[in-house]
Image (cartoon, rainbow, N blue to C red):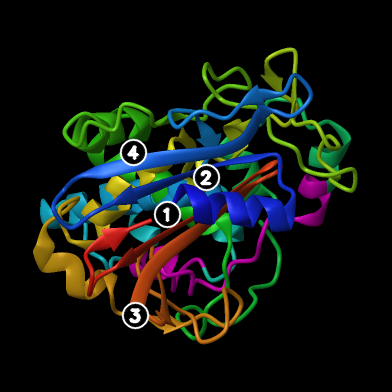
Amino acid sequence: IQKALQEFRDESKFPGAVAGVYFADGSSLAVAVGFADRDAKTPMRESDLLHAGSVGKTFFAALVLQLVAENRLKLDDRIARYFDKEEWFSRLPNNKAITIRMLLNHTSGLSPFGSEFMQELAKSPGKERSPFEGIKSILDSKPLHAAGTKFSYTDVNYLLLGFIAEKVAGKKAYDEIKRRFLKPLKLRRTIPADSPVIPGLVPGYAGAGNPFGGDQMMKDGRLVLDPRFGWAGNGFVSNAEDLARWYAAYCEGRAFDSKLLPEVLTTVDAPGVGQGARYGLGVVIQDTPLGAAYGHGGFFPGYVTWVRYYPKKRIAV
């Protein structure tokens, strides 16, 4: 694994990476290559933390699935049930037709963050923004399509899910995720991206063309782009070994009631995610030389993540 990762670095010239693997017998490992700090030439370590980007959505999906198993909400509940008393809700596209399932599988018809929000993000990346500001950015816009008719990926879906989960659980989603998943599964290297200062997070390098703060995404120990607006859309930093173990638990139905696994693996065509890709509930399914693989990608400026579970082999990478 170390050799393969080093070959990728030799070819692609990225500063550094960590790869984690979970095996069918329950064991796991991590290997690292390159630099954690490109300028100081600090070697990357197996235990280092990186921003997991949208892989963080899977923790919020699992929280919702546990609440479904507890009969506290249903996958086909309309979200109006949870938001109809909010003054902004009537301005949300497709508001009356969207269900929990449509948020989970990105078929709501809601668009990505509004252009004004993205321009402000580029202008002042270090400013603290609440997750609700991302939702607010698409109010009064036109839906991309009728709810439930096709796939269109947006963080807004998961921000709405996060607020629903908190309403139903009566507790902060981060606290519930820690209690329900991080502690029981001993994911000690997975922590909320709820501050621009995150102990143990290594610097990311986004390239000079990055509009959200330029190449160096960490200065004086602070993320240049405040991550708090991402929340349920991408709200965790983690270690590759933790993510491999987590995603195996998710795809084997150990992170929620396994009776819900068929729902998780029921997919819609997701051409925007990759050739032949299908999207379930927090899972991208693609055909590979090792059979169908379940996965999820993650991006935060300066950091790229991909996690995959191979059910035939019961291995996660």
* Magenta stretch secondary structure, dominant: loop
Query: Label for residue 84?
Result: 1
Mark 2 falls on what kind of element? Answer: helix
Local crowd size for mark 3, using a 10 Å CA cut-off: few (<14), some (14–19), many (≥20): some
Disc 1 versus disc 4: distance between alpha carbons? 16 Å
Residue picked out by circle 2: 234
First in sequence, mark 3 or 2: give its number: 2
- Quarter of the picture containing the C terminus is bottom left
Question: Is label 1 or label 2 in front?
Answer: 2
Q: Which residues are magenta?
A: 95-118
Identify the residue at horizontal 52%, vertical 48% (top origin): 233
Tell me: residue 310, above or below residue 82. Answer: below
First in sequence, mark 4 or 2: give its number: 4
Question: Is label 1 or label 4 in front?
Answer: 4
Query: Label for residue 50?
Result: none
Compared across the picture, whether 68 is left or right of 62 comes to: left
Local crowd size for mark 2, using a 10 Å CA cut-off: few (<14), some (14–19), many (≥20): many
Kindly check if marks 3 and 1 are in contact, taking CB atoms under 8 A apart as contact.
no
Tell me if residue 112 is in the magenta stretch: yes
Residue picked out by circle 3: 292
Residue type highlighted by circle 4: Glu
Compared across the picture, whether 146 is left or right of 255 comes to: right
Question: Is label 3 or label 1 in front?
Answer: 3
Local crowd size for mark 4, using a 10 Å CA cut-off: few (<14), some (14–19), many (≥20): some
Which of these two is toward me, 192 or 162? 192
Kindly check if marks 3 and 2 are in contact, taking CB atoms under 8 A apart as contact.
no
First in sequence, mark 1 or 2: give its number: 1
Query: Label for residue 166?
Result: 4
Disc 3 versus disc 2: distance between alpha carbons? 25 Å
Residue type highlighted by circle 3: Ala
